[in-house]
Structure formats: C-alpha cells, structure tokens
Image: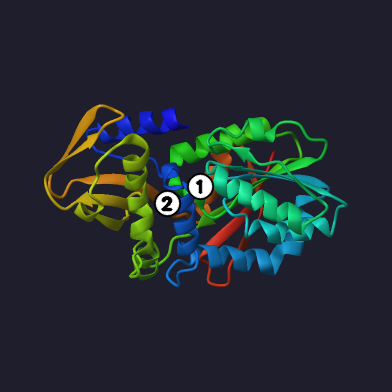
C-alpha cells in the first residue's frame, strides 16, 4: 500500500490536470472524519440508506434467499451492515461476513465490535481495495451476497463502475447477487451542502489527503493555502471535489524527489460523486452483467438500494 500511495501521488500530481485518488482519504483520521460527515444534517446519504434498511430489512433478507454469506466492499465502520446482519441471523443459524476495506484500523475495530456483539457471526476482515474483489469472493458453500453500500459506486466514472460490476460478476456463481447502494439525482440546494458543509468537516476530510502526503511522503503542503471546493457538473451528472491553490506556489515531496508547481486558482481533483436515475442504474447493471431483481427507495426518493442478480 505505501508504494501504491507514492506511485499514485506521483502520477496524479504530475498530470496535466492534477488529481488524487479518493481511496487515500481513508487513513485513521480520514475514516473518523467521514464518520463525522455522516452525522452532519446536510449529509443525507447515510440517513437515507439507513431508512431503507430499517424499513425493509426483513424483506431484503428474504430476497437474499438465506442461508447466505455476506461480502462487503468498502465496509468502513459497518454500522448500516448491522441491520442486515441482524435480519439474516434471524433466518439462519450462523453467518459468515467478510468485510473488505482499505483502512486496516477501522476494519480491525469494526471486526472486533461485531464479533463481540453477535456470537453466531464469523468475521473474516480483509485489507484491500474494492477495485479488485476477486479474492474476497472466493470459496463458500453458501450463496454469496456482495454488499456495496453508501453510494461508493458514485465515486467511479461510468466505465469504471461498469468494469467493477463486471469484475464482481465474474467472481460470482449462479444464484449469487450484488446489493448495491446508489445516490439519486436531486436539487442542487440539497446536493451542494452535502459536500460543502458550513462546519467545514468535509473540507477537513478533503484536505486530509494532503496531511497524509506530508506525513507519509515528506511533503510540505501548507493546508491554509488550499481551499475545498464542491461543484456540480450537469453534463456528467456528478459532484466534483477539488482542492484549489490560493496562490502560485511550489510544494516539495521529499520521498518522491519532486517539486510540484501550482498556479493561483489551480486545483487538485480529489473525488467524484455520480448521481443516478432509474434508467442509468439499469444500464449500469446490464453493462456489468446483472439483472435488477428488486429495488428499494427512501421516503423522499433520494437514495436507492438494488438487488442485482446473476442471470
């Protein structure tokens, strides 16, 4: 992972249009900041999906056709997953759960909490990137349900999202399924504050990637000289997050042996969050080799969870 981080930082900050990959938000501090974002009144995403799971857990668990095992891509703290775990443990004597996450700290903490809470739950934590899920999906006597919650699919461009679904599909057997969370299009006065909150928690989350580069790669980014910016691209249907240089400046990254020049107003593109509608979700499922078997939405129609099955 350290070599991947260094290589990706070099690639992103020497590109003609500078970028950093969003998975590098999630060190211990970044994960804590994201958990704080989920508590913000402006950030509707977690509450909308939690509403779906609380309202329909029994129906969703039945649709999974237990007994099953769960594999979760980008599991994070696993707070929402507990709702599904409890619903499944009411329907099968024990449950195997394999969470996959890039942050070993949050993964270890979550696994210990889950094991202590549910005595019939067997947890096998896996440190890794959800872009390559094949190892996490191998080997189980039960049907596999892959969870990809929280609209993380929106961080990927459409071709990348379809490629990920194709990779997941290729590792699944007949009868297995993918349970996918996706954020839906909605008014800008709801969208923008969710990614640029007045308290500045999302800004701190965004800037944390610079903190990591300073700490792990010996850089000298001055965080005060970068602004967090969230914008909506109507043509691409996505929120974009950027870190914008306030001034013309040069940043030295000692481990990489490079200097990175920024013009005043130049940005580092750090994250996308694509928003979907029914047609684009069905198109994504088809491109990935799945059928949309069933879907659930929250009461405001802001978020959807879909059960995608292998044809």
In percent of the image, x 51 and y 38: which residue is there? 162
**Callouts 1 and 2 close, C-beta under 8 Å:** yes
In percent of the image, x 35 and y 41: which residue is there? 215
Q: Position of residue 48 (x, y in %)?
A: 55, 66
In percent of the image, x 46 and y 47: which residue is there? 26
Pick the residue in front: 285 or 133.
133
The numbered dot on residue 153 is 1
Q: Position of residue 167 (x, y in %)?
A: 58, 32
Pick the residue in front: 65 or 19.
19
Secondary structure under tag 1 reads: helix
Q: Position of residue 301 (x, y in %)?
A: 53, 67
What is the residue that sits farthest to the right in this orientation?
93
Pick the residue in front: 310 or 218.
218
* In-image side of 86 versus 75 (left or right): right
In percent of the image, x 38 and y 55: which residue is there? 205
Name the image quarter holding residue 232: bottom left
Q: Is residue 192 visible?
A: yes
* In-image side of 233 versus 283 (left or right): left
Where 191 falls versus 12 (above or below)? below
Q: Is residue 20 visible?
A: no
Where 293 falls versus 250 (above or below)? below
Q: Position of residue 23 (x, y in %)?
A: 45, 43
**Alpha carbons under labels 1 and 2: distance apart:** 8 Å
Query: Dividing the image into 4 quarters, which one contains the C terminus?
Result: top right
Name the image quarter holding residue 5: top left
Name the image quarter holding residue 87: bottom right
The residue under label 2 is: 274
Secondary structure under tag 2 reads: strand
* In-image side of 127 versus 249 (left or right): right
* In-image side of 138 versus 8 (left or right): right
């Amino acid at each position: 992972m350290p070599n991947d981080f260094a290589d990706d930082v070099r690639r992103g900050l020497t590109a003609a249009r500078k970028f950093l990959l969003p998975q590098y938000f999630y060190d211990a501090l970044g994960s804590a900041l994201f958990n704080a974002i989920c508590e913000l009144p402006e950030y509707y995403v977690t509450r909308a999906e939690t509403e779906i799971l609380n309202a329909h857990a029994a129906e969703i668990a039945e649709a999974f056709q237990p007994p099953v095992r769960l594999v979760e891509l980008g599991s994070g703290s696993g707070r929402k997953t507990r709702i599904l775990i409890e619903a499944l443990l009411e329907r099968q004597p024990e449950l195997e759960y394999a969470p996959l996450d890039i942050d070993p700290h949050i993964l270890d903490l979550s696994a210990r909490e889950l094991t202590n809470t549910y005595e019939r739950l067997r947890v096998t934590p896996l440190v890794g990137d959800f872009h390559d899920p094949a190892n996490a999906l191998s080997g189980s006597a039960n049907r596999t349900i892959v969870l990809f919650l929280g609209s993380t699919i929106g961080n990927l461009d459409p071709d990348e999202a379809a490629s990920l679904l194709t990779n997941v599909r290729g590792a699944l057997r007949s009868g297995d399924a993918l349970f996918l969370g996706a954020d839906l299009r909605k008014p800008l006065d709801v969208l923008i504050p969710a990614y640029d909150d007045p308290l500045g928690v999302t800004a701190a989350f965004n800037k944390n990637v610079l903190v990591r580069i300073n700490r792990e790669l010996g850089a000298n980014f001055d965080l005060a000289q970068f602004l967090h910016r969230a914008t909506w691209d109507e043509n691409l249907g996505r929120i974009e997050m950027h870190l914008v240089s306030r001034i013309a400046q040069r940043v030295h990254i000692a481990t990489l042996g490079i200097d990175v020049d920024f013009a005043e107003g130049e940005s580092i593109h750090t994250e996308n969050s694509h928003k979907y509608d029914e047609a684009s979700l069905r198109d994504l499922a088809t491109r990935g080799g799945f059928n949309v078997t069933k879907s659930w939405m929250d009461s405001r129609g802001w978020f959807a969870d879909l059960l995608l099955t292998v044809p």
